[in-house]
Image (cartoon, rainbow, N blue to C red):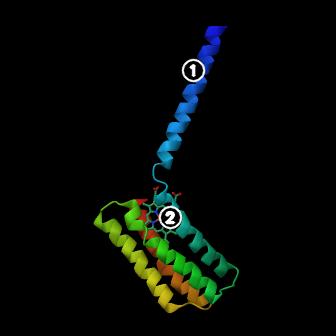
Amino acid sequence: MRAALLLLLGLVIGVIGTVNAVNALNARNPMPHAVMVTMDYHMGQLARALKARQCDAAKIRQHLGRLQSTATDIVPVFDLSEKPFNDAAGHLQGKIEQALLAAPADCTALAAALKPIGGACKSCHQKYR
Ligand code: HEC
């Protein structure tokens, strides 16, 4: 009986140990995930505004601004020191900058501004994701 209990205890501890190791691996650097998810959120909000045909200039500006500041974290956070990757991040920043300068104030302008940004996300993903 005692041996059986000890065996069971050993198994349970073993399972807990494995789960903790997996969590530790995922938690090692949550930042790349966090940066991408944050950008995805702001792109998603802009896409929703477009879909709902509620393209408010101030809200657009706010989401584009958050997109811009988050995009500046890509290079330091991924820390790949790979030129094509860093160039792709720079390309995205350029597109966001253009969108901010265009200051979209209606849905047509927002759609036009989002297209190249989405393209910049996609082209890096095709290569690196
Ligand atoms: C310079 C390259 C690059 C650019 C530009 C880029 N991404 Fe990513 N993205 C990646 C890589 C690499 C991954 C995979 C990250 C990983 O698995 O750790 C990724 C993953 C993601 C994910 C999945 C996140 C996760 O961990 O579940 C989302 C969502 C995402 N990107 C959204 C975006 C959006 C939105 C944009 C544009 C506004 C964008 N990305 C631009 C490189 C890029």
| Residue at left offset 50%, top offset 49% | 27
Q: Is residue 114 above or below residue 30?
A: below
The residue at 60%/25% (across/down) is 12
Mark 2 vs 1: CB contact within 8 A: no
The residue type indicated by label 2 comes to Met
Instruction: Check the image and report above or below for 93 versus 82.
Output: below
Question: For numbered disc 1, what is the local secondary structure?
Answer: helix
Q: Residues within 10 Å of mark 1 (few under 14, many from 20)?
A: few
Ligand 1 is within 8 Å of the C-beta of the residue at disc 1:
no
Mark 2 residue CB less than 8 A from any atom of ligand 1: yes
Numbered label attached to residue 36: 2
Label 1 amino acid? Gly
The residue located at (47%, 59%) in the rendering is 31
Residue 61: x percent and y percent?
57, 85
> Residue visible at 38% across and 76% down?
91
> Is 75 rendered above or below residue 52?
above
Q: Is residue 1 left or right of residue 67?
A: right
Residue 23: x percent and y percent?
Answer: 53, 43
Residue 3 rendering spot, x and y as whole percentages: 61, 9
Residue denoted by label 1? 10
In the image, taking residue 127 as reference, residue 54 lies left or right, namely right
Count of picture labels = 2
Can you say which quadrant of the picture contains the N terminus? top right
What is the spatial separation of the Cα atoms under label 2 and label 1, in whole angstroms? Answer: 39 Å
The quadrant where residue 127 appears: bottom left
Classify 10 Å Cα crowding around label 2: few (below 14), some (14-19), many (20 and above). some
Q: Picture coordinates of residue 76 (x, y %)? A: 38, 65
Q: Which mark is residue 41?
A: none
Which of the marked residues, 2 or 1, is nearer the chain's N terminus? 1
Q: Secondary structure at mark 2?
A: helix
Quarter of the image that includes the C terminus: bottom left
